[in-house]
Image (cartoon, grey):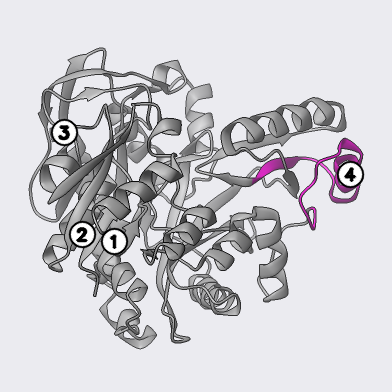
Amino acid sequence: MFTTVLIANRGEIALRVARTCREMGIRTVVAHSTADRDSAPVRFADDARHIGPTPAKRSYLNLAAIVEAAVQCEADAIHPGYGFLSEDADLAEVAAQHGMTFIGPRPDVMARLSDKAAARTVMAEAGLPVLPGSATAITALAEAEAVAEEIGFPLIIKAAAGGGGRGMTVVWDRRHLPRAFAETRASAQTVFNDGRVYLERYLEVARHVEVQVLCDDHGNGVHLGERDCSVQRRHQKLIEEAPAPELPPGLADRMGRAAVQGALAVGYTGVGTFEFLVDADGSAYFMEINCRIQVEHPVTEMIYGVDLIREQIAVAAGRPLTLTQEDLDARRRGVAIECRINAEDPARDFRPTPGLITEFEPPGGPFTRVDTHCRAGWTVTPDYDPLLAKLIVWADDRDQALARMDRALSEFHIAGRGVQTSRDFLRDVLAHPHFRRAKHSTSLVDQMRVAGM
């Protein structure tokens, strides 16, 4: 097992990883920017290393600074969390060159799957269903027009190196394709330093359902069920729940088996998430693989009683899985829901609202979990994701879980100078009849905004 792990991230996920490491007897060192020098993860960890000024490009996205910090603290592993460099094959490669383990899939596997267009092709070859789209990444408008002619409209243009809900544009007709293509490529180049894109048939009414997989380096793989992540704004998730409610009989099992099949086909190791779209007819289509721990992993942990970070670290250390699919199927119980509490104003198109938090009172009660790095006196900067906390609840069934979540949200009190949160909007979503009947889709938030809710 590892002796020292450098945590190359910030916020709640850095604290989350540090807590599991402490339980495992592993020394932790948190890499932090200037803005995060007094953060909860830095306070909690055994040690910390300053890696640069506040802007992410000069700190959390600075590969050289992160590797130097890991070498200085004699880390034998790097945990990347989610976001930032969590799916960067170069970081994994450089870490290996310095004798350190990147807690994630091997560099070659990650490089292969981080190209979303290539991942579509690989998974189609492994037998997973995919939506009609381009077989490879595209850089020329003529290629895009040829693919569009073949698959029809509406379609969606996605950054090949994309992630986190960014780098996507829906195109409804041929007239808007040239401009959308150029703008998406420019955005992808700016955000991901890679202007390649691919096209895919767009499903206007669909659910976003993902499958959590866990694979070791000994040829073993399991899935830990599915999560519904359909409540989104600008393709970024707001509410997640497990298991996904009201799926057609047998679909969840088929998706789980397909995800494990796809992961083993490419030699995947560690935790990963296979994302699917489920259309109105109940057919599921593979979208992409996230080669990291997900923001919403706690809902899976709650219904299976498994610490996914612990399993991720153990697998990275070369240990075989101790969980079988039969074990996991037997221990799955109840319903869990997660709400992301963000510093943003839903009434202004979810515009971020940075500022000083003056009051921070999280909820309590039975089967209620709060993952957060915030506290009274903490300044929310505009430089990072606006996530303040993840509120997770568990109950025996969905109705009880919804009631518990609404109660917990009503207790969650956050106030500050300039800081507004998404709390009340999340309560509105929970109360929406489409959501309560599990008849919602990825368009629910847009529908609510049009209706003035």
| Quadrant of the drawing holding the N terminus | bottom left
What span is colored magenta in the figure?
Answer: 134-160
Relative to 160, is 63 on the left or the right?
left
Residue 266 x/y as whole percent: 59, 75
- Image quadrant assignment for residue 57: top left
> Badge 3 is on which residue?
412
Instruction: Tell me the mark number nearer the camera, choosing from 1 and 4.
Output: 4
Decide: few, some or many residues near mark 4? Use Cα within 10 Å; few <14, some 14-19, many ≥20.
Answer: some
Q: Which residue is mark 2?
A: 395
Q: CA distance from mark 1 to mark 4?
A: 45 Å
Which of discs 3 and 2 lies nearer the camera? The answer is: 3
Residue 286, located in which quarter of the rendered image? bottom right
Label 3 and label 2: CA atoms lie apart by: 19 Å
Sequence-first tag of 1 and 3: 1
Q: Considering only order in the chain, which callout, 4 or 1, is on the residue closer to the N terminus?
A: 4
Q: Marks 1 and 2, how far apart in space?
A: 6 Å
Left or right side of 131 for 110: left
| Disc number lying in front (2 or 4) | 4
The mark nearer the N terminus, 4 or 3, is 4
